[in-house]
Amino acid sequence: MLLSIRNFSPSVRAYLAASFLLGISIDGILAVLFNLYLLRLGYSTEFIGIVNAVGLFGFAGGSLVAGALGSRLGSRRMLQLATLLVSLGLLLLSSSGWVPAGWQGAWLAGSYVTIFLGQASFFVNGSPFMMGSAVTADRSTLFSVQTAVQSLAAFSGSFVGGFLPELLAHFLGRPLDDPVTFLIPIQSLVVISLLAAIQVYRTVEPRQMASPAVTDKTRPGLRMSWAGIPLALILLISFIRLLQVAGLGAVTTFFNVYLDTELHVSTSGIGILTSLSRVIGVPAALLVPRLTRRFDNLPVAIVGTLLSALFLVPVALVPNWLAAGSGYIASRMMVSVRFPAFQIYVLERFEERWQSLVSGAMSMAAGLSFALMALGGGYIAAGFSFRELFLLGAALTALSAFMLLVVQAQTKRRVGRE
């Protein structure tokens, strides 16, 4: 991976550095500690679901806006805005301990929305930035390295984040359930996010887009007229994306809550399981270029999607930390395979002028899916159990894989006619 990174331009390396720093902050430390911090403050599972949903609805709505603005202002400017929004949101969240109790819930939700608005802009405009910064032959490698970098960052952050509350409790002489021991690590994320902003300011706007995408076996199935916005196709892809990430949305929001409240796993244990689920994504993502060269992007995306759903079944059905953790780790590994293959497959179907919009639409669909699973998941877990929630997410993800199989079959049929 290091050799691949050295071959990228300084601008791309700066973007990857920013992605790594934000990954440590948001996908690592905050992902492990935020829900547990809310539990230590005395909030219910339903409230946790609502706060996560509010943030993710912000991600969904912000994604489409970020894509449209990226088309007008350029991806680099939107990446700069993204890192500043994330820093502002983390700063607001860091001050939540001093907010009066009557306002604290709204303050937490507003902080989380701000963070996710920044995340939306960074995620949406990162894909067109990379598409414009790499020649066609390098795209699979670049997207795979990005996925590996994010996985490595999330591993580092979640591993460290899981131990920080216990270390701080020992150092400060406070009980393990004191919210302060969870808040202090969150406060440190402001500095890390500002370092990410500095890296983004070192990038340059891509001056010329990559050469036209090479046609593979799947391309004829998605031909379209470029006279106007290809709305029908964008809506279809967005719906598939919404279903595709439902399982991931369920476990991303509630897996640490499930481990804490149902399986009684320690915070450090939760951090270890979460970090392992992310570090396994590094070699998985780096295998994607080889897999896509042999099988093409769409088949790899289909298999990755289906397996990510199947591996959630033991998470739902076996109330044991080892079985649940193993299933979660395996599912996240397949997400690291699915993501770059599906992202490249979709973006290469569209002309340059639509790529920011398409990236925004896919991110909006993913954010909406996460938000719905977070909002409904809190009530499902409280009214039924986490088992029903995780099974629902797995079923929706599997459904998206079957929809992609239909797309593949129609593609082969059209190729046969030609």
Image (cartoon, rainbow, N blue to C red):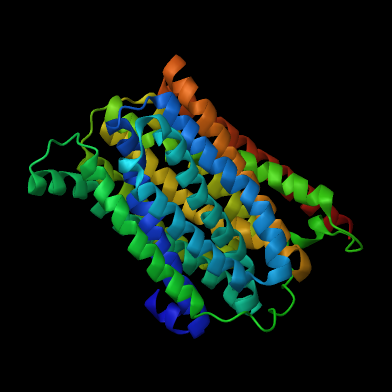
Question: Residue at 88% across / 63% down in the picture?
Answer: 226
- Measured as percent of width and height from the top left, residue 343 is found at 62, 59
Q: Nearer the viewer, residue 156 or 310?
A: 156
Q: Quadrant of the N terminus?
A: bottom left
* Residue 245 visible within the image: no
- Above/below status of 391 relative to 383: below
Q: Describe residue 30's horizontal placement relative to residue 410 as left or right.
A: left
- Measured as percent of width and height from the top left, residue 130 is found at 59, 72
Question: Residue at 43% across / 28% down in the picture?
Answer: 47
User: Could you say which quadrant of the image residue 77 lies in?
Assistant: bottom right
Q: Quadrant of the C terminus?
A: bottom right
* Residue 192 visible within the image: yes
Q: Describe residue 185's horizontal placement relative to residue 194 as left or right.
A: left
Q: Describe residue 410's horizontal placement relative to residue 240 as left or right.
A: right
Question: Residue at 80% across / 56% down in the picture?
Answer: 222
Q: Nearer the viewer, residue 230 or 204?
A: 204
User: Could you say which quadrant of the image residue 384 lies in?
Assistant: top left
- Above/below status of 361 relative to 198: above
Q: Residue furthest right?
A: 227
- Measured as percent of width and height from the top left, residue 43 is found at 35, 27
Q: Nearer the viewer, residue 407 or 383?
A: 383
**How many callouts does the rendering have?**
0
Q: Describe residue 174's horizontal placement relative to residue 406 as left or right.
A: left
- Measured as percent of width and height from the top left, residue 401 is found at 62, 42
User: Could you say which quadrant of the image residue 188 lies in?
Assistant: bottom left
Question: Residue at 43% across / 47% down in the picture?
Answer: 332
- Above/below status of 243 relative to 332: above
